[in-house]
Image (cartoon, rainbow, N blue to C red):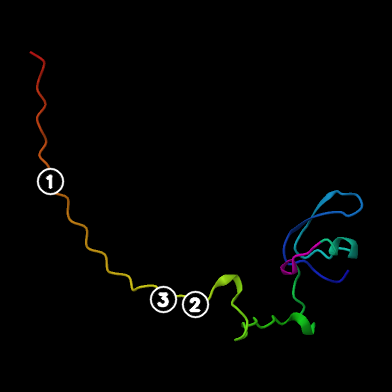
Amino acid sequence: MGRRLAAAVHVKHPTTRERIVLEPGDEPDDVLAAEITNPDAWETDESMPDAEEPEPEEPKQDEPSPFGFTAQPEPEPAAEPEAEPAQPTARRRRKTADTGA
């Protein structure tokens, strides 16, 4: 115990296989805490030194870029202003023929 949840979590109890919903602020026991694999589900503790987010790693010059991306993305072209919509022209209505005598 000791760690608090920051979000609601659905877990399956490892021994009973029962589905359990843990609410934000709950402090689950160690057996259930081991089933929660999402690190974002936990509240960050300011007293812990590991609470800092790690810096993203930049690819080294010798290594190929991940996922086959080799070039920098091209900037999007500037958007052209839209033309003002034309006013609809008035249409004449046709008279309907009277069929009543």
Name the residue located 35 percent from the left edge and 73 percent from the top edge: 77
Q: Is residue 12 above or below residue 66?
A: above
Q: Image quadrant of residue 74?
A: bottom left
Name the residue located 80 percent from the left edge and 82 percent from the top edge: 48
Query: In the rendered view of the protein, which quadrant contains the N terminus?
Result: bottom right
Query: In the rendered view of the protein, which quadrant contains the C terminus?
Result: top left
User: Which residue position holds label 3?
Assistant: 75
Q: Is residue 2 above or below residue 87?
A: below
Looking at marks 3 and 1 on the same chain, the residue that comes earlier in the sequence is marked by 3
Along the viewing direction, whichever of 88 and 99 lies nearer the viewer: 88
Looking at marks 1 and 2 on the same chain, the residue that comes earlier in the sequence is marked by 2
Q: Is residue 10 above or below residue 49?
A: above
The CA distance from mark 1 to mark 2 is 54 Å
Left or right of 45: which side holds 81? left
Label for residue 71?
Answer: 2
Label 1: element kind: loop
Q: Which-is-in-front pick, marks 3 and 2?
A: 2
Q: Is residue 29 above or below residue 17?
A: below
Q: Image quadrant of residue 9?
A: bottom right
Q: Amino acid at mark 2?
A: Ala
Q: Which range is magenta?
A: 36-41
Q: Amino acid at mark 1?
A: Ala
- Where residue 2 sits in the image (x, y, percent)? 86, 71
Query: Are the residues tagged 1 and 2 within 8 Å (C-beta)?
Result: no
Label 2: element kind: loop
- Residue 66 falls inside the magenta stretch: no
User: Which residue position holds label 1?
Assistant: 90
Crowd around label 2: few <14 · some 14–19 · many ≥20 (10 Å) = few
